[in-house]
Amino acid sequence: MLYVILFSLFFLGLIVGSFLNVVVYRLEDKKRKNIRGRSFCPHCREKIKAYDLVPVLSWIILKGKCRSCKKEISVQYPLVELATGLVFAVLGYIFLQGLTFSIASLVNLVFWFFFTGCVITVFVYDLKHQIIPDEIIYTALVVALVFVGLNTGLTDNFEYLTEHLLAGFLAGGFFYSLAAVSKGKWMGGGDIKLVAFMGLVLGWKGAIIALYTAFILGALIGSFFLLTGRKKMGSKIPFGPFLVIGTFIGLLFGEQIVNFYVSMFM
Ligand SMILES: [Zn+2]
């Protein structure tokens, strides 16, 4: 039974992933609003046939090229679909284990799917354009506030509310001061909102692990780029993608890692 659910979640993720590609495509150029996203080839504007819109599979069959103009279709499309599918299945595996059905667990699962969609969009957009779109991050912040409020109401746990509000506020404040000290060179406004969102949904344990992972990854990959000469000292690397990876690590393992450290020193 569990595997049937996980398989369905994977396929749901593939479909949500192709929707995320459309969202990214539209955010890249606001004028595209009237065009129905990926149903057109970005090069020749030829309408893409329904049978060529199957997530991942179509891209592989067409060898990453448009059927009519043969120009390259970015590997971003299948990768985003595949990543969303995998994350959905992993979230399902973790959240559905030993879970009894309740409104609270349903709210949580739906929220984590929404959360996945938001952060994958941020990841792709920041990687491509070095900016986190306000449309996405403000929507994410508002929905996160509603989610934290709902969770508090459903569980009557006011400790949860204070912890998550405080984590969001402190993480955002920390990044705000980093941005102020460096005059926006280290962190941008988008990163501040992203970590506020992260703290809000993860709480302090998850947020600490998420930030820690993001900084270590950033340092490792930054030095790799410097050593291989791909980037110069002082050139910009978007920090959002590291924060997104850190957030997933914090979400999945934050609680266990912090509890493990606490038990070692107490
Ligand atoms: Zn084409």
Image: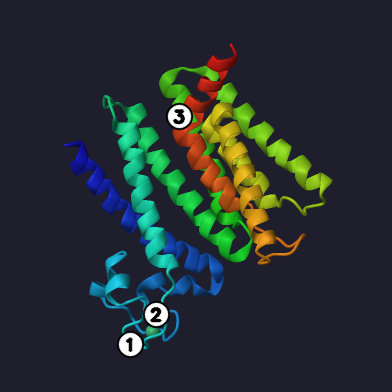
Decide: is 213 above or below 79.
Answer: above
Secondary structure type for disc 1: loop
Residue 63: horizontal and vertical position, in percent? 32, 76
Q: Quadrant of ligand 1?
A: bottom left
Tell me the distance, in whole angstroms, between the alpha carbons under discs 2 and 1: 9 Å
Secondary structure type for disc 2: loop
Q: Nearer the viewer, mark 3 or mark 2?
A: 2
Decide: is 89 above or below 133.
Answer: above
For the C terminus, the image quarter is top right
Residue 258: horizontal and vertical position, in percent? 54, 24
Q: Which residue is mark 1?
A: 68
Q: Which residue is mark 3?
A: 150
Q: Quadrant of residue 252?
A: top left
Tell me the distance, in whole angstroms, between the alpha carbons under discs 1 and 3: 49 Å
Residue 210: horizontal and vertical position, in percent? 57, 38
- Cβ–Cβ under 8 Å for marks 2 and 1: yes
Q: Residue at x 44, y 51 (%)?
A: 117
Q: Give the residue furthest to the top.
A: 266
Decide: is 234 above or below 261.
Answer: below
